[in-house]
Amino acid sequence: MRQRKKAKRAAAYLAVSAGAALLLSGCGSQYQVLDPAGPVAKTELHLIVMSALLMLIVIIPVLILFFYILYRYRDKPNNTAPYEPNHQDSKVLEIVWWGIPILIVAILGAYTIKTTFILTKPPTNTTPITVEVTSMDWKWLFQYPGSHIATVNYLDVPVGVPIQFVLTSNAPMNSFWVPRLGGQEYTMPGMAMRLWLQASYPGKYYGHGANFTGRGFSHTTFYVYAKPMPQFKQWVQSVKASAKPLTMTEYKKLNVPGIVGNLTFSSYPKNVFYNTVMNDGGKYMSSTMDSMMAIGKKASTSNMSGMPGMSNTSGSSK
Amino acid sequence: MPPSHLSHWGLLITGDPLIYGADASIVLATVAIIFVLTKYKKWGWLWREWLTTVDHKKIGIMYLIAAVLMLFRAGVDAELMRTQLALPNLHVLGPEHYDQIFTTHGTIMLLFMAMPFIFALMNIAVPLQIGARDVAFPFLNAISFWVFFFAAMLLNISFVIGGSPDAGWTSYAPLAGAGFDTGPGENFYLLSLQITGIGSLATGINFLATIFKMRAPGMKLMKMPLFTWSIVATSILIIYAFPALTVVLTLLLIDRIAGAHFFTIAAGGNPMMYINMFWIWGHPEVYILILPAFGVFSEIAATFSRKAVFGYKSMVFSLLLISLISYFVWAHHFFTMGAGAGVNSFFAVASMLVGIPTGVKIFNWLFTMFHGRIRIKMPMLWMLAFIPCFTMGGMTGVMLAAAPADYQYHNSYFLIAHFHQVLIGGTLFGMLAAMYYWWPKMFGFMLNEYWGKWAFWLFNIGFYVCFEPQYILGLMGMQRRMYTYPKGMGWTDLNFISTIGAYIMGIGFLVLVWDIVYSIKYGERDLTGDPWDGRTLEWSLPSPAPHYNFAVIPTITHRDHWWELKQTGRQDELKIHEQDIRPIHMPKNSGKPFLIGLSFFVVGWGFVFEWYILAVLGLLAIFVMMFMRSAEQHPDYHIPVEEVVHTETALGRL
Amino acid sequence: MSTTIDHTGAQHGHDSHSSTGAFVPLEYSDPDNAIKIFGFWLFLAADMVLFACLFATFIVLRTHIANGPDAQHLFDVKGFIEETFILLTSSFTGGMATFFMRHRRVKGTVAWLTVTALLGMAFVGLEITEFVHDVGIGATMQTSAFLSAFFTLVGTHGLHVSIGIAWMISIIVQLIRYGITPATARKVFIVNLYWHFLDVVWVFIFTVVYIMGVIHA
């Protein structure tokens, strides 16, 4: 219900601002981008609304002026409107319409830069958990370095905890996108890139590859299940207890182009993510090396203390 | 998954009704053309008057015909895609066909429809507007056309022979590399773009040299018509952008056929370099496509408001400013590639900056109409449709430029809606406006307004019905390039509406073609040479202009020279006196450009199928013809005075 | 496409051949020639962008050696110094050809152009030798991204030089047949523009590829 309310509020917000009331009446959560379920998507929606509003300040007068001029200066007999065939220069007017767009771009530019930098940081101060994402032809492999489990084509995350997604690809580039949690980022071979997302409410969120990867592209759907921390922990425990491990043979099989359903694994081969990134060209990318080092360090501490990613989060979320 | 009957290295693709249909129509059309040409004994005429011509006006007409044909071909692609997406889980097209069709749709629309349409207008209007008798390099101009033409044939034939490319019009590596995309399809893309790119680059050089070196006496740069100015900006963009495309295509081709490692995942290749270099060409290319339309609208707004363009200097300055900024925005095509906050901020703000000069142009067009007398003829109608459509497209463009927001729009239907709104609402509306505007100058008769209006309204209404829902689909999370989608996402209704819009646009296009056919038979003849009460020099000439354009080159004193003369009753100043006529030096026709184009086709074919002997033979043929050309001592001739006098008398101008 | 620009075209669009009176070099003596030379400058601008892209590619990939050799182990200092010396000399001899052309001395022009073309051939020969040697020790285009970029950048320059040689030979033939006319004068001038341009590009290759390669690969 809270979700519904939220959706309505988002709808009303945008209706007023973007004049999109018609489009939004009633069916909140299907308008995924306009119905954020986490702080990142919310920040981005804020920028979307802001930019639309700022643009409308120019667009609406232009359109009104356009129709007025069109009506007023039609070439018809008895039109009393002034006709000045050589009226072709005006310093004042030119300054006005160079000035207004400059002003708007300045405001929007400043706001954009601010948001850009904000989104490189975790959305909240809670201790994050890390998920390593590998896009393959045509499926998604998610690895949890904190608990050493892996899933395919779905993932569970705890509510209220920032998730640090580390993205790579073992196939042509794809893009990791969960619209209701936030914007996308490319998954690329040889790169390990970071994307922060966080879910504010429990729910099932649609995710999909957003960059064309060939014949199976339309089937690169996955779902994110956000659940409260206790349930999440419970889920991890049950996976560890009941699922089979992901062996190297299985990993290679997974990497063969094709479409599979949801899979769950209680463990995965050591350093498989790291090695994938490095072998696909990561060793030449200084930025990848840096982020791998940072993440690698995290991963090693987590290995030492069992499941610290989780113990940390549970500690701070209380 | 790919059905097994689509064999990739076999030449003819078999086992598919869609392909058989294409096969049949190609064969039928070819037979029909050969039959008509033979029956009416038109082969000689075709060769002498068209295939060997170096006349910019005829080359322009050939570009125009090719552009309309390609608009049809890529339009069919679009209709097929929209049919497939009309409802969830349809199987009108399988993924392998859908992928090919969206790839050829984009590639053809941009490189083989919009570009030749622009080149058509450049060829038709620029020399006439600046008082020149031809372009700087007429022979090269003919080569440009024929390499474009044969490149277009090469890409189109891929659908039935060898298989079409299927990695998207951007053809990102490593997806388009040999590792993930086997078969000749991708080679067709690389070679046809490479070959047409050579022609485009030559056209850019040609027109910049023409405009800088061949203006009539008195026509200072700041007295040039704004369309000519827009071609200056476009030509500069072509010269500095197309080599990047040449390089990126070559490197990918070397990767594919020689096993190199520029963009592969293995052995140190770097796929991101492909994306960067592609867009270093690709973004200026977007402005190559839009600036000529801006030029067209400036001409049309002034002519049909009977008023000088408002803020001429601002218009020129903004054209040049847009070209400059266009080199600093390429990374906004991949904000989500993780370049870091600093880089993204730079490219976001640079992209927004483009909105400033563009906005200024919109205001200037509005104030060109302000205090004018607006006549709503067909060209003006398209111009009037452009303003609200492009303004909205510009708005969503600035929204896309806000990098963090782009994380939510990128590769979604929101993006698709945006670039179709600016490319159709901007470029295509501009090209159609220009077609109606200069049609009488090209052919000597007007296009019919009644059918023109039907086409206009169908196409416009269809456009909004088709593309506005796609903005919302994007916000609902629908990605581009999906060949189908599941039920229950809430996408069904909007997709269905969008498909109906696409059909309405398709009908609009057919009515447009009907308008042309109808007008050829019944169109009003243009006997004055100045049907719109024009402002610039081309309207002082008869329609169509004689092949030497100007019997005597005029001396220019005003910006809108012809309008000024008409206002002050001095049209007689452009009247020709027999004693002023001198023999006119003109280039001779030549069959070599056609044969060079054909040889490029052979080269392309050789590389596509990796039959290197064929490719080498084609290259040799090209070199031999160029050396023969270089050794020709008299590629030109003089039109004697009597002939000029005779022609001008027949036109009633002496 | 370079050679297509060099065609003997009509002085279309001009009623008469105006001579400006002030001194103009022979290759500019006809208004149509001036347009062609301008057009060729535009082509060189485009060609410059082409090489800039190849240089950028090389710089990005120069350390991506995979399992292949790096620059330090591959480049033969003596070899590329020789190539540089020969090409720079050929630029000078090309300039001499222009000098003789402006003095309407056919024999001198032909002789200097011939020397230039021969030096060009020597350069291409050395480059082919270098490539053959590299391939012989297993350093091929398929070995690593660095080598892909190296062969493509240097090879593109070599291809340009080869086209230049063929072009020069065709101009030498025309000079012998038709003597020095405004048209042949223009061709001598333009082919030299092209040649000097390739020299400048080589200086960058020498620095960015070879010197930087052997200093710290």
Image (spheres, rainbow, N blue to C red):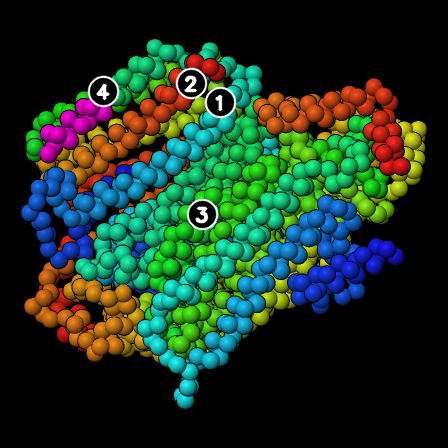
Residue segment shown in magenta = C89-102
**Mark 4 or mark 1, earlier in chain:** 1
For disc 2, the chain is C
Point out which mark residue B517 bears. none
Q: Can you identify the residue that label 4 sits on?
A: C89
**Mark 4 or mark 2, earlier in chain:** 4
Q: Nearer the viewer, mark 2 or mark 3?
A: 3
- Relative placement, left or right, of C107 versus C155 is left
Q: Can you identify the residue that label 1 sits on?
A: C62
Please give the name of the residue rendered at 70% of the width and 48% of the height, measured from the top-left corner: A43
| Residue contact at pointers 4 and 2, CB within 8 angstroms | no
Q: Nearer the viewer, mark 1 or mark 3?
A: 3
Q: Do the dots labelled 4 and 3 sit on one chain?
A: no
Q: Nearer the viewer, mark 4 or mark 2?
A: 2
Please give the name of the residue rendered at 79% of the width and 64% of the height, measured from the top-left corner: A26
Residue B38 position, x and y percent, is 35, 61
Crowding at label 3, few (<14), some or many (≥20) Cα neighbours within 10 Å? Answer: some
